[in-house]
Image (cartoon, helix red, strand yellow):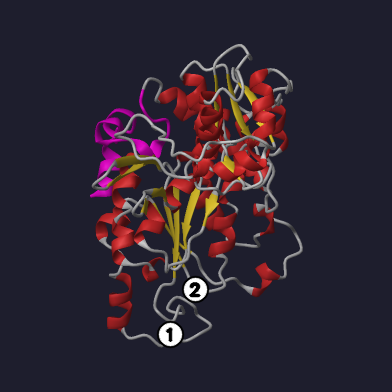
Amino acid sequence: VRAAVRNSGYHLPTVSATVNLAPADRRKEGPAFELPIALGLLQAMASFQVTVPGRYAAVGELALDGRVRPVNGCLSMALRARSEGLDGLIVPMDNAREAGVVTGLDVIPVNHLTEAIGFLCGSQPLQPVRLDVDRLFHESRSYNVDLAEVQGQHHVKRALEVAAAGAHNVLMIGPPGAGKSMMAQRLCTILPGLHLEESLETTRIYSVCGQLEPGQSLMAVRPFRCPHHSVSNAGLVGGGTHPRPGEISLAHHGVLFLDELPEFARSSLESLRQPLESGRVTISRVQMTVTYPAEFMLVAAMNPCPCGHFTDPRRQCRCSPRQIENYRRRISGPLLDRIDIHVDVPPLEYRDLAASRPGEPSAAVRERVVPARERQLARFDGQPFFTNARMQHRHVKEHCPLDDDGQLLLR
């Protein structure tokens, strides 16, 4: 801070200065305080007088030459500034589009410490960021993959459609090369589009983690996360010395795809049980306890055996019955109970691979999924959930009563 102030043409005395960051019981970390600390010190020394009307806050990292660098979590800071009744927020230029989606708050982008000072003292008028949020939101809603690219596997695609309609978790079991990963990657394309509030929630998580693209304002499409099976428990559900969101939170309002499910650490898989039930994950540390949102669809894929060819009629399986049993026992029963749809994915026939006729496009499937979601929204009006997958026992008894034939079938 001292070097940035000096290189911006201002002088700080050589004596030490004490900066109080209140409230004291909340942990502070990161470089976002550097710009407000510099502004506070200079104002306390009467280096400039604030004349701009209204209440403004500032966030940003300072380079040694006084340039203002971007920080993580700027969207959350802008939302908090609005909730605190502030009139505006001074942000780094690279965070302008991210914070600019918050309505009812003047977001002032600056490139340098001197620009922030000039704005506050009235010598350098700066215009707040004005974004057409609705236009930006709808223009960015596109995918570069489509379900029509998947040849064959019609019953598996039907299972994914049912899963998308009710937000059900899915487990696909089949040999390598059957198209499990390809279909999972296209599940987001048949889900209903994000609402603006859902987009803001997801964008806040990516902003805090520093995973927004430069200049990106909103996450307009549902996230698809595919962590490697070597991911740590903290990387999957969140954690660390200073807790950070994990993959399940980065998949909030989207899809979490776990390929080669039995290869994941048992402890990591078991840690998914509570978030799958509640839609959030709570991380407790000595210094703090944080809760992150984690409302996602789980899509998992696995081979039927260690070699992968147990159900393949064209290739011979080399695994013993004990090896197959041990392989499948890596996934606990309680976790499997939380996966509503289990579907076998057979190996593709040559005629399916050679077919020139494209499959049904994602847009056509989505046109059937959206009305199903709308019916659920009306059915669960007033409830804290709005999809079939979130129903509890009493809701199942109320909305899905079985007649005599249905009960006989389940016996």
Q: Closer to the camera, 174 or 99?
A: 99
As drawn, 117 above or below 269 = above
Q: Earlier in the sequence, mark 1 or mark 2?
A: 2
Q: Position of residue 96 (x, y in %)?
A: 66, 34
Q: Please say whether residue 177 is visible from this viewpoint.
A: yes
Image-quadrant location for residue 90 = top right
What residue sits 53% from the left and 26% below the top?
A: 45
Tag 1 residue: 317
What residue sits 47% from the left and 20% below the top?
A: 83
- Amino acid type, callout 1: Cys
Report the span colored magenta: 383-411
Q: Closer to the camera, 333 or 225?
A: 225
**Which residue is farthest top?**
53
- Amino acid type, callout 2: Pro
Q: Position of residue 125 (x, y in %)?
A: 74, 20
Looking at the rendered structure, the secondary structure element under dot 1 is: loop
Q: Closer to the camera, 389 or 101?
A: 101
- Residue 322 inside the magenta-drawn segment: no
On screen, residue 81 versus residue 19, left or right, reads right
How many numbered marks appear? Answer: 2
What residue sits 40% from the left and 79% below the top?
A: 306
Which mark, residue 175? 2
What residue sits 49% from the left and 37% below the top?
A: 33
Q: Position of residue 108 (x, y in %)?
A: 66, 26
Q: Closer to the camera, 228 or 316?
A: 228
Circle 1 packing at 10 Å, graded few (<14), some (14-19), many (20+), is some
Between the C-alphas of marks 1 and 2, the distance is 11 Å
On screen, residue 170 versus residue 327, left or right, reads right
- Residue 407 inside the magenta-drawn segment: yes
On screen, residue 206 versus residue 353, left or right, reads left
